[in-house]
Image (cartoon, rainbow, N blue to C red):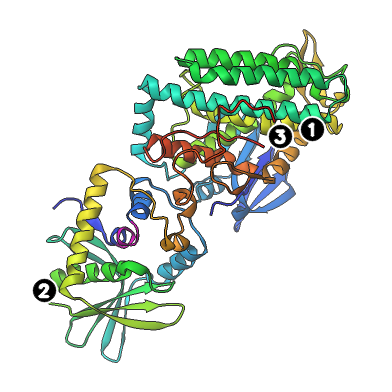
Amino acid sequence: MRTLLNTLYVQTQKSYLHLDNDNVRVEVEGERRGMLPLHHLDGIVVFGNVLLSPFLIQKLGRAHKPVTWLTEWGQFTARSETPVSGNVLLRVAQHACTCDPARTLAVARYIAAGKLQNQKTTLLRSAREAAEEDAPALRQAARDINAQIAVLPLAETVDEVRGIEGTAARSYFEVFSLMLRVNRDFFWLGERTRRPARDPINAVLNYVYTLLAGECASACQTVGLDPQIGFLHALRPGRQSLALDLMEELRPVVADRAVVTLINRQQLTPRDFTLHEGRTVTLTEDGRRTIIKHFQERKAEEVHHPLTGRKTPLGLIPHVQARLLAQHLRGDRPHYPPYLHR
Amino acid sequence: MDNPIPLSALQHFVFCPRQYALIHVEQTWTENAQTARGRGQHERAHGGGTEERGGVRTLRALPLVSRRHGLAGVADVVELLPDGSPRPVEYKSGRARPRLADEVQLCAQALCLEEMFGVSIPEGFIYHVASRGRRNVAFTPELRGAVLEARDGVRALLGSGELPPPAADERCRLCSLFDACEPFAPRDFPPGYDPFDTRLL
């Protein structure tokens, strides 16, 4: 049984992590800040100027626990590859599938269907909790997305699937701010802007998506899939297309929901943002810490997986989905079953 | 000689061809309490070296190979009787497995030992750590045949690279790969699961 373990995120600059028996010892400028038993961890994610001792890196590698290096602002730079790199036949099957337009289309359609279903579920849930004047617009957006789900089976190319997904995304993000109940004058969302974010919601979304993408890439790596060879996302050098594919179904459930919750509970407030000249926005270190903490708690929540029929921590869903995809690619399942959140 | 078949693979294959394929073809390995215990016991048994007691020499972690049958592996324990004749002893942490999986693994060790020592070996032992009981396994022609049959099955699966369907029977309760195998989850979409569902809930 794979159990959900913690990911250690270290974002305090000038931290030094080293091995102390079977613990990770975290020091900042020579002062001890924490000790964590290695067997509670499934990996370490470090931001920016954080040092890891060679013994720690090697010990983590042998235990199949990857280290992920992000920039101080959360941009992916590197991940350690651990000795088990999975099944070469699986990677060959994955490549063969991407060379087969019909099979690629089928996988892409199911991934998009999962994303749209979960966007719909998220909007409808917010509609039930929303103020009377906001609920109709949220329900209407859910109906618009539903209409896009209805045309998905008719899509004949992956480009058409991407078009349908884009239309649904516009309906979804148009009403995204209506899911918020506080600080609405501050938390506004223009169009989706990546780097740099042009508004506070984009700044938070980008950050949570980075964390989630890291989890999805690890899941691919653990199962032995090539994280760069995707189906819905176009192949592009340096892009983790498959990790992004796996992330699609989970964005509304894990990331978007987290952002809405944190803002509504006022755990994230305008103080957690820095507004720069020229209208770009970044998160403060405290803001990022709040997000990581919530993200970790959310991962431990158990959800019912509609296909396996089992209760699974949300944080393991990327692994379950990567494995289901691997089973499909290896001919053990006729279709890829996306995760549908209830 | 083709690449020799690992002795441990025979045990997995006889227990369940899909378990074998998951471990050796799909490279899936999940540890549960049972496998962790087994690994610990094997690490102890595989400390290597020899000891002698009552005229019987005990060899640990002895490398085995049979060129004739195309098998290779490491024996937990081999006992050398006073006349120099070897007897394989396989350590098992759990109870006896159905389908002769452990017996086949033990007999495969005997086939290697027969070739390496130039003797014939009538029997070996399976030692159950939990009950501290040792049971005698006779290497009958049927059991020897089962070893070669399993070896051919392993070779065929490795060659095809395919994953056999799940057993989905009482064996699955004992299997550490339950999660990766999903023996009882439907292969196709179950009733009520529809990614293109357009009912609004």
Is residue B16 at all visible to an observer of this figure?
yes
Dot 3 falls on which chain? A
The residue that mark 2 highlights is B118
The residue that mark 3 highlights is A13
Q: Which mark is residue A261?
A: 1
**Amino acid type of the residue tagged 1 in the rendering:** Thr
User: Is A313 in front, or is A286?
Assistant: A313
Q: Position of residue A114 (x, y in %)?
A: 58, 29
Is residue A240 at all visible to an observer of this figure?
no
Tag 1 secondary structure: helix
Q: Circle 2: is it few (<14), some (14-19), or many (20+) Cα within 10 Å?
A: few
Q: Residue at x 39, y 51 (%)?
A: B166
Dot 2 falls on which chain? B
Q: Does the CB distance between marks 2 and 1 fall below 8 Å? A: no
Tag 2 secondary structure: loop
Magenta segment, principal secondary structure? Answer: helix
| Magenta stretch, residue numbers | B11-16
Q: Quadrant of residue A182?
A: top right
Work out whether A252 lies above or below A46: above
Work out whether A239 lies above or below A304: above
The lab-note entry on whether marks 2 and 3 share a chain reads no
Q: Quadrant of residue B125?
A: bottom left
Q: Does the CB distance between marks 3 and 1 fall below 8 Å? A: no
User: Is A296 in front, or is A82?
Assistant: A296
State yes or no: residue B14 in magenta: yes
